Amino acid sequence: MKILRKIKQNAFKIVGILLALVILAFSFLYLMGTSLFYFLIAICFIIGGLPFFVSIILESQEIMERDEMFLEFSRNLIESVQAGTPISKSILNIQSKDYGKLNPYIQKLANQISLGIPIKAAFETFARDIGSTTVKRAVTIISESEKAGGQIEDVLESVVKSVSQIEKLKKERRAAMYNLVVQGYIIFLIFIVIMLVMQYKVLPIASGLGQEVTGPEGDIVGDDFMNIFGSGEQRATPEQLAAPFIWLLVVQGLFAGLVIGKLSEGNFKAGFKHSFILIMMAILASSGARLFFGPAGG
């Protein structure tokens, strides 16, 4: 089932990339140099990156659900062990219960145990398949405790409390950081607005200062003053000066998203979905402004 899901995800990504390439080729062939060309380039980035964005979100949500279901699985396991049933027998007894996304992994764990595979090896495979750091830590403690013998029910109870506390802290952090995430998006929107004002209002005025202006006594002033925009007859246009703005927005969106993900969910991988949203907002705003208002200074 896991392989089938991977195949579907990869197919979704390939379709997105192919569709983006088709639109990109059409844009280069028929719309090159127009304002609509830049807008379609932005659409290509969105279509090509959307499958990866959706994949990251689904994977993150699935890991969260697995962690929650593992907590429920651990509680049922400890109840069975406290009743005097060995841990291997307890796993076989509770495998029929519904644990959502965790069902295939628990079924595989039970099948391995029924085939005589040692508990430690079966648990290691179980944790590796799930891919959650929380589950890996808990499973390592459980397998080592089973190997050492002793009061396995006490160890399981401690593991359950630890996992429960970790999940509680994660939820509290997400709730506490919600306002910070919203502020990050608002600040980035303000940054986009500032860049657009610079591009369509400030730069045309600034470049106009470099034109030759006749003074009161007929002398030419202002030409030397604005040589920073170019030298001699090759003075830079507002459009050329505005070209780096889109890269400023993209870089700002990338790192702002990574920081938001790290603060809100504790890892940079989760930040890629925020980075994708911010970068797409920047590209659409820049290309959309170009489509409706024309090039800077135009």
Image (cartoon, rainbow, N blue to C red):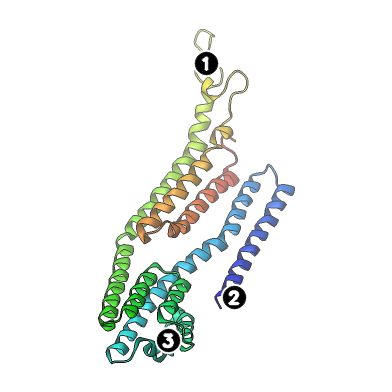
Query: Between residues 63 and 132, which one lies in front from this camera angle?
Result: 132
**Residue beneath disc 3:** 98
**Residue beneath disc 2:** 4
Label 1 or label 3, whichever lies nearer to me, is: 3
Label 1 or label 2, whichever lies nearer to me, is: 2
Residue 65 image position (x, y, % from top left): 41, 74
The reply to whether callout 1 and callout 3 are in contact (CB within 8 Å) is no
**Residue beneath disc 1:** 224
The residues tagged by marks 1 and 3 sit, at their Cα atoms, a distance apart of 78 Å
Q: Which comes before the other along the chain, label 1 or label 3?
A: 3
Query: Between residues 271 and 146, which one lies in front from this camera angle?
Result: 146
Query: Left or right: where does residue 18 sit relative to residue 171?
Result: right
Q: Residues within 10 Å of mark 3 (few under 14, many from 20)?
A: few
Query: Left or right: where does residue 75 sit relative to residue 192?
Result: left
Point out the image quarter for the C terminus: top right
Q: Residues within 10 Å of mark 1 (few under 14, many from 20)?
A: some
Instruction: Give, as a three-letter code, the residue at label 3.
Output: Asp
